[in-house]
Image (cartoon, rainbow, N blue to C red):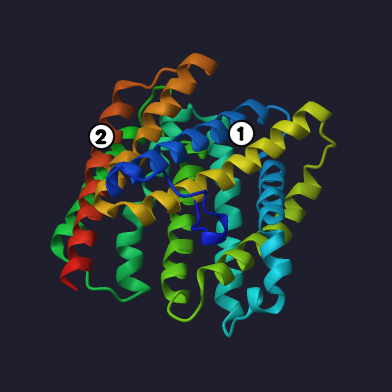
Amino acid sequence: MTEPVTADLAAPASPPGLAPNVRGALWMLASALAFTVMMTLIKYLGADYPASLQTFYRQVAGFLVLLPIILRHRGAAFATTRPGILIFRSAAGTIGMILSFYGFQKMPLADANALSFTRTLWLVPLAAFVVREKIGPLRIGAAVVGFLGVLIMVRPGQGGHFALGLPALAMLASSFLFALTVTGMKVMTRDHSPMVLLVWSATLGLVLAIPGAFLAWRWPAPFDLVLLGLMGVMGTVTQACYIKGMAIGDAAAMAPVDYVRLVFTAAAGFFLFHELPGKWTLVGAGVVVASTLFITWREQVAAKQG
């Protein structure tokens, strides 16, 4: 659910004097905190506002944040020679967001968040088949182990509060679609600036969210409108802090910090919604985290060798 942002949206620079990885980690912690606030609001508002309607408000907030950039750059902000890929990427991102919001509404926050980290696992086969990257046996093995961790969490065919069902399938499908948007970004950044990709994503994302919002439309109460707006702003803050942290710190060092989201969302679920993750969720999440960290480390090593 977090797509890259441009330097125009990055928060002010961190105070000097700290090591880059420390400063990057602080931005990653801020991203995790903003993400937790956003997910908490999604779940809290979910009883009255379906995922498609929440997605619309999220996209409205993101578009309004980008509107000054669009007005300032105008035609250059939409300059592209491959609109088809951009439309496909925006559609995948919008559908992925709706499915993700649905999963967070219907599942315990910690469980849904754990499944959201499978995006890194999906990137391995997509990199091989779409981007034509050479994938070594270690990365393939790590991805297979990660998906075994997913099976441990969802336990298809077994009982329990977290078994394979529509919300879990929605989270897995959402992670796959978000991985598609990341893969598309890798392809498009070869001849497109990040600003162009983000402007297209925000604009088309808003347009594509309108039909779902229309079908589930209800006028929000004034206080709910404030919360929906705050939810959208927190999504943008999450993106900005994440990209800032990754830009300042080493990717291999920042990836473990990002997993503090699991702790934050589990705490929010426990204290606000009385949710307690099951033992198999914790075991499976541990396997997924270990495998995705290994994949991140391998990609960092390969990038340095390249």
Q: Residue furthest bottom?
A: 81
Position of residue 164 measured from the top left corner of the image (x, y, whole percent): 42, 36
Give the residue displayed 48% in from the left and 26% down from the top.
108
Q: Residues within 10 Å of mark 2 (few under 14, many from 20)?
A: some
Q: Which mark is residue 261?
A: none
Assign the C terminus to one quadrant of the image. Answer: bottom left
Residue 154 is drawn in which quadrant? top left
Position of residue 59 measured from the top left corner of the image (x, y, whole percent): 67, 51
Q: Indicate left or right for 271 with 160 as reference.
A: right
Q: Is residue 9 visible?
A: yes
Between 194 and 107, the one lying in front of the other is 194
The mark that comes first in sequence, 1 or 2, is 1
Give the residue displayed 31% in from the left and 43% down from the top.
17
Seen in the picture, residue 91 relative to 226 is either above or below; the reply is below
Seen in the picture, residue 287 relative to 127 is either above or below; the reply is above
Between 270 and 212, the one lying in front of the other is 270
How many angstroms separate mark 1 from mark 2 (CA)? 25 Å
Q: Residue furthest front?
A: 17
Residue identified by numbered label 2? 286
Instruction: Say what amino acid the circle numbered 1 marks.
Output: Ile
Residue 205 is drawn in which quadrant? bottom right
